[in-house]
Amino acid sequence: MAVRGLRFPRLNLAGSRVTELRIQGRYGWNEDRATLLNDRFESLPFSPSANGYVSFTGYTTRDAAKTKHSILAFLWKDDRWTDELYLLLVYTVDPTPNEGIGPSRRRESEFLSLVRELEEPDSLSASVEFRFGDKSEADLWFPLPARLSGKASGTTLEVRGVRGAVLTADEKPSYAFVLDRTPNGNVMVSISFDLHGTFDPDMLRIAFTRAEKAVPDLVVQ
């Protein structure tokens, strides 16, 4: 049953240089989940297909600065490949969003209620992408681009990106990161980490805040 008023949080991604926030989940397939999805065919709508099930909801919203954002949510199962159900949420800053995507409050609450009823997934993770303008080497945790000689020929190799992980006090990864500089000088940062528990729409805000706090260790803003 849909929970009235349940909705995705409205975040000011552009104000924090975020270009995309993504959450992905994977659920084991069982009879209870099959029954739940079958019950939602007409109300979501949730479309059965030859290969499984697909549901989608999407719309645009604006932040306080009138920047357009797109929120896309998918839940699908493809019987051709695996006996699992997948969740994908993509929250983006999109200057030219698909005009066919518009607000749909009823479908939004129904979609989120359905995902909550699926209970805890087997895996759930978040990734947040940031884009900055041209930054000096001094502004970056690792100077990019960096030049090194090749091991065999001595050819100059230009390093344009590095990846790593931040470790906790007990040597476990807290989050993974990728720091890149594009050929035109823009700096890109990706922060990714696992989430735990039954999905809740506020996890988008939690992931957004956590990634924001991680970025200053990599890029001076």
Image: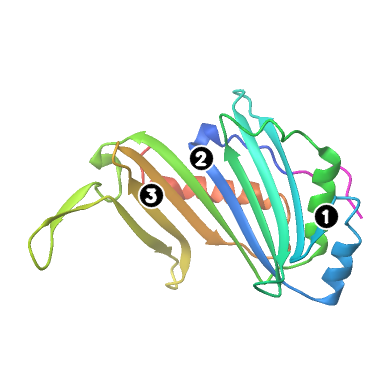
- The answer to whether mark 1 and mark 3 are in CB contact below 8 A is no
Asked whether 2 falls inside the magenta stretch, the response is yes
Q: Which residue is identified by label 1?
A: 46
Task: Please tell me the numbered disc located at residue 18.
Answer: 2
Task: Please tell me the numbered disc located at residue 221.
Answer: none
**How far apart are the alpha carbons under marks 2 and 1?**
31 Å
The residue lying at 47 percent from left, 53 percent from top is 191
Q: Which residues are magenta?
A: 1-7
The residue lying at 36 percent from left, 43 percent from top is 219
Query: Could you say which is closer to the camera, residue 149 or residue 177?
Result: 149
Relative to residue 143, is residue 176 depicted above or below? below
Closest to the camera, between mark 2 and mark 1, is 1
* Of the image marks 3 and 2, the number of the one nearer the N terminus: 2
Is disc 3 surrounded by few (<14), some (14 to 19) or many (20+) residues within 10 Å?
few
Tell me: 98 left or right of 166.
Answer: right
The amino acid sitting under disc 1 is: Phe
* Prevailing secondary structure class for the magenta stretch in the rendered image: loop
In this rendering, the count of numbered labels is: 3
**How far apart are the alpha carbons under marks 1 and 3?**
43 Å
Indicate the secondary structure of the residue bearing disc 1. loop
Is disc 2 surrounded by few (<14), some (14 to 19) or many (20+) residues within 10 Å?
many
The amino acid sitting under disc 3 is: Asp
Tell me: 35 left or right of 83.
Answer: right
